Image (spheres, helix red, strand yellow):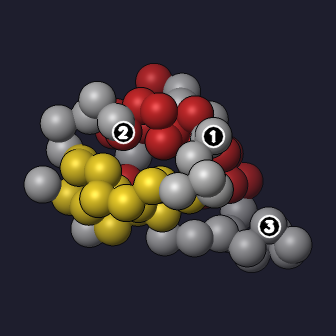
Amino acid sequence: MAIDGRNDLYGDDLDRLFFETGNGQESYATDPYLNEAGVVLLQKDEPLAGLLLSDPRFSLVYQDQLAALFVKR
């Protein structure tokens, strides 16, 4: 799932969940959208990318200077 932050199309609750998950808050572990994701593409320096490196649900399959790509195990 990706959220276009230019407009408030999704409502405050979904926006909050998206930003909390991306920032690596504890709720990332129960985020239903992350739990359903087969592929996660993040900026390498985003807090969630660091968490997913040790998360048993995901494997890092690619990383460069900007991005990290994870797939569900």
**Which residue position holds label 1?**
45
| Between 61 and 55, the one nearer to me in the picture | 61
Q: Nearer the viewer, mark 3 or mark 1?
A: 1
Q: Residues within 10 Å of mark 1 (few under 14, many from 20)?
A: few
> Which quarter shows the C terminus?
bottom left
| Between 31 and 44, the one nearer to me in the picture | 44
Asked whether residue 16 appears in the rendered view, the answer is yes
**Residue at 26% from the left image edge and 34% from the top image edge:** 55
| Between 11 and 15, the one nearer to me in the picture | 15
**Which residue position holds label 2?**
52
Q: Secondary structure at mark 3?
A: loop
Q: Nearer the viewer, mark 1 or mark 2?
A: 1
Looking at the image, is mark 1 or mark 2 earlier in the sequence? 1
In the current view of this chain or complex, which residue is farthest to the right?
6
For badge 1, the amino acid type reads Asp
Image quarter for residue 72? Answer: bottom left
